Image (cartoon, helix red, strand yellow):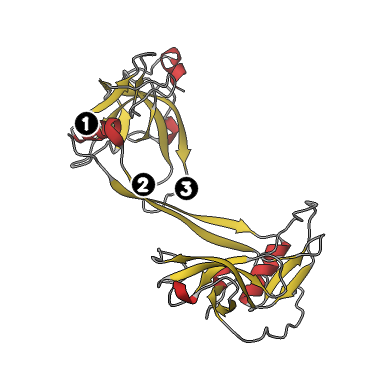
Amino acid sequence: MPEVLKAPLVVEFPFTRSLGPVQSAFLTGLRERVVLGVRASDGRVLVPPAEYDPVTAEEIRDLVEVAPTGTVTTWAWNHAPRRGQPLTTPFAWALVRLDGADTALLHALDAPDPDAVHTGMRVRIRWAEERTGTITDIACFEPYDGEPPQLIGNTGEFEDSVTGIVAAARLDYTYSPGRAQTAYINALGGRRTVGERCPSCRKVYVPPRGACPTCGVATAEQVEVGPRGTVTTFCIVNIKAKNLDIEVPYVYAHIALDGAGLALHGRIGGIPYDEVRMGLRVEPVWTEGARYPDHYRPTGEPDADYDVYKELL
């Protein structure tokens, strides 16, 4: 049995969000060690605050200060914290209804073990030492058996309000390409490109998926394609990507390799970016030890006729 390939992959990007008046007041309040909810049309105080009424769908802005103390309504033990979670030691995820609120806020509860946590236990906010106007200004909740503190009735009026946040979205996972793409990757190691032909529609899919996405039948017949191909469409990239040592502008294109029934992605080099065009004939350029082409360059052949590749756009 051939070796099953697998590799760790990370998808990560910064997500930037502007804040409306309610969320701005809520996060600015956390920075100032104040918790704000919002009063809905039915009289309930919602924490975290919603921007629109859950009953009427109308916009709501009646901000109400609630206490940093509350009661655990339900919880689950996290025995193995992961990267980026609030605490590095085992803790409980808890829904806490703060005093003065009618809904619960989800956050970490610092406790020594599951036996120390129970529904109905009293807790309070442990504030982060450095606060910037994000939910992590609440470092966690901790057990507390005292009285709720006296509130000042803050209504959300702050100087230098937080108007936007940047949250890092990240997904770590292990990718295994399966039988069809393993064969494709192994062939690339020998500077060959192989796809699989559908036994029904006879299209050759590159990279192969193991099944025809059109007919829904399994594919097994391997077909070598290329190495030359035709640019079917393209875009000019003007924004430099992080950790990518390619000067902008450059061209990224869909390339239909000869014999393939599907275009794949590739960078176009060896030609000024403003001379790349649909129908341009190209060939792969490999670098020493690479597992895939570094880019594609013009072959010098006449451009392909539009009718040859129009079905591959």
Q: In the drawing, does residue 122 fall left or right of residue 214?
A: right
Q: Nearer the viewer, residue 8 or 285?
A: 8
Between discs 2 and 3, the one toward the N terminus: 3
> For mark 3, does the 10 Å Cα neighbourhood hold few (<14), some (14 to 19), or many (20 or more) residues?
few
Secondary-structure class at tag 1 = helix
Which residue does the numbered mark 1 point to in the structure image? 187
Mark 1 is on which residue type? Ala
Name the quadrant containing residue 187.
Answer: top left
Secondary-structure class at tag 2 = loop
Between discs 2 and 1, the one toward the N terminus: 1
Percent coordinates x, y for residue 39 in the rendering:
78, 65
277 is higher (above) or lower (below) than 66: above
Mark 2 is on which residue type? Ile
Percent coordinates x, y for residue 63 in the rendering:
76, 69
Which residue does the numbered mark 3 point to in the structure image? 239
Is residue 56 visible from the viewing direction of this image? Answer: yes
Tell me the quadrant of the picture where the N terminus can be found: top left
